[in-house]
Image (tube, grey):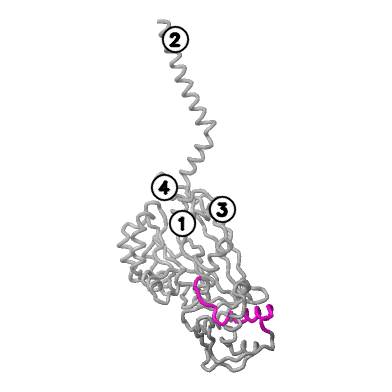
């Protein structure tokens, strides 16, 4: 009997020690971990996007700015029937098929988590006025202001400056990791309409232009619905970008292209800075950044002239007559010709090896030409002949 009693005491002593250890772990050694988890379950973080930096040309004129735009927003959890709401709204604010699809697809999720839903972006003055008059019929909807990207020359700088677009999950995750902001999935779930640079300077200098995200910390209930705001960390607005582009030079180049397929890049010789960068046909960056319809976007993609294709940086074209000054310089530096050298230009050049004929742009040629005249009249024959007399490997090295 005594032995059995000892076993019972030992057993209960072990059980008591185990529970004592667990209690100590929960209340002391692992307290911080559980406290952090509890706070995370009670709060959710929502990103606050900073105001994007302004882009200027070389003389300080604004190319891209931020302008206030107005969105119609609804408190989804307070709407009993989204179809009835949209029906009542239609006489005041008309939604296209894409906007209707977006509202219906996202309504349930927003309502479940007590979040706001953007019904329509970029309201016109007329739509704002109508809603202000009849807004009393929609107590759970309101108009909110945000800043959207606006290019003062949307076709002129479509490829050089580029455009902004909606941020996807991977892009936002990368941004938040760089700022050491936690809860990436949670933040993205409740983020609405955030944009980053997608092409051109907007993309290349996105990290500078976009600034740093702030955040709002909300208390949530057991179902994950937002209850109240607990903390607000202000965002840091983006830095401005001063470029070497010149609006007037850009306009001249754009006008000369006359919407034909091609590109113009003007480079300042002394500094190497780009003064003009044009690719045509172009498109409106404002339409892309601020919500183009699917039909209009597909039309641009399917356009045979490929307006999205940046011919200035991605196109492959022969250098044509722009190579002639470089060949002339090579000939002078390597004593192949001098400034007094001249030759007859009959309007063509015959390659001695196979007698193949390469014709100049002017039928009959330019007669007797020296280097100076050859440059002025852009004599193909003169520069064909000079290139032929040159060491091809040295010429390639010179041109590169």
For residue 133, what is the image quadrant? Answer: bottom left
Q: Is residue 294 magenta?
A: no
Mark 3 or mark 2, earlier in chain? 2
The reply to whether the magenta stretch includes residue 328 is yes
Say what secondary structure mark 3 lies in. helix
Which residue does the numbered mark 1 point to in the structure image? 191
Badge 2, how many Cα within 10 Å: few under 14, some, many 20+? Answer: few
User: Seen in the image, is 164 located left or right of residue 323?
Assistant: left
Rendered view: 283 above or below 22: below
Q: Earlier in the sequence, mark 4 or mark 3?
A: 3
Q: Position of residue 283 (x, y in %)?
A: 46, 75
Q: Which mark is residue 271?
A: none
Residue, x 40% and y 53% (percent of image)? 114
| Chain-order first, disc 4 or disc 1 | 1
Q: Earlier in the sequence, mark 2 or mark 1?
A: 2
Q: Between tags 3 and 1, which lies in front? A: 3
What is the CA distance from the residue labelled 2 to the residue labelled 1? 63 Å
User: For residue 179, which numbered disc appears in the image?
Assistant: 3
Q: Quadrant of residue 80?
A: bottom left
Q: Are marks 4 and 1 in contact (CB under 8 Å)?
A: no
Q: Classify mark 4: helix, strand or loop.
A: loop
């Amino acid at each position: 009997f005594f032995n059995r009693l000892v076993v019972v005491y030992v057993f209960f002593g072990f059980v008591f020690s185990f529970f004592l250890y667990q209690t100590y772990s929960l209340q002391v050694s692992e307290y911080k971990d559980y406290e952090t988890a509890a706070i995370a379950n009670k709060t959710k973080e929502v990103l606050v996007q900073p105001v994007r930096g302004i882009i200027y040309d070389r003389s300080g004129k604004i190319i891209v700015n931020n302008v206030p735009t107005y969105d119609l927003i609804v408190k989804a959890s307070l709407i009993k029937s989204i179809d009835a709401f949209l029906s009542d709204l239609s006489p005041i604010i008309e939604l296209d098929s894409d906007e209707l699809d977006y509202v219906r697809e996202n309504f349930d999720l927003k309502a479940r988590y007590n979040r706001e839903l953007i019904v329509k972006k970029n309201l016109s003055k007329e739509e704002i006025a109508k809603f202000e008059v009849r807004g009393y019929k929609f107590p759970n909807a309101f108009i909110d202001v945000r800043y959207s990207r606006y290019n003062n020359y949307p076709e002129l700088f479509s490829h050089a400056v580029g455009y902004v677009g909606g941020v996807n999950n991977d892009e936002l995750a990368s941004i938040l990791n760089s700022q050491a902001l936690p809860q990436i999935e949670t933040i993205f779930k409740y983020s609405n309409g955030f944009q980053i640079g997608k092409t051109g300077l907007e993309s290349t200098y996105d990290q500078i232009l976009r600034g740093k995200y702030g955040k709002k910390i909300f208390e949530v209930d057991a179902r994950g619905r937002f209850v109240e705001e607990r903390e607000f960390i202000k965002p840091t607005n983006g830095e401005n970008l001063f470029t070497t582009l010149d609006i007037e030079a850009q306009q001249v180049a754009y006008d000369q292209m006359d919407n034909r397929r091609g590109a113009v890049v003007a480079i300042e010789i002394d500094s190497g800075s780009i003064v003009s960068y044009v690719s045509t046909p172009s498109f409106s960056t404002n339409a892309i950044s601020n919500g183009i319809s699917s039909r209009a976007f597909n039309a641009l993609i399917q356009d045979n002239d490929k307006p999205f294709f940046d011919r200035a940086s991605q196109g492959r074209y022969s250098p044509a007559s722009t190579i002639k000054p470089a060949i002339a310089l090579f000939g002078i530096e390597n004593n192949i010709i001098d400034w007094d050298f001249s030759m007859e230009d009959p309007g063509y050049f015959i390659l001695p090896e196979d007698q193949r004929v390469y014709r100049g742009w002017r039928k009959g040629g330019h007669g007797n030409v020296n280097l100076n005249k050859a440059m002025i009249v852009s004599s193909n024959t003169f520069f064909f002949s000079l290139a032929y007399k040159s060491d091809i490997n040295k010429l390639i090295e010179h041109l590169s």
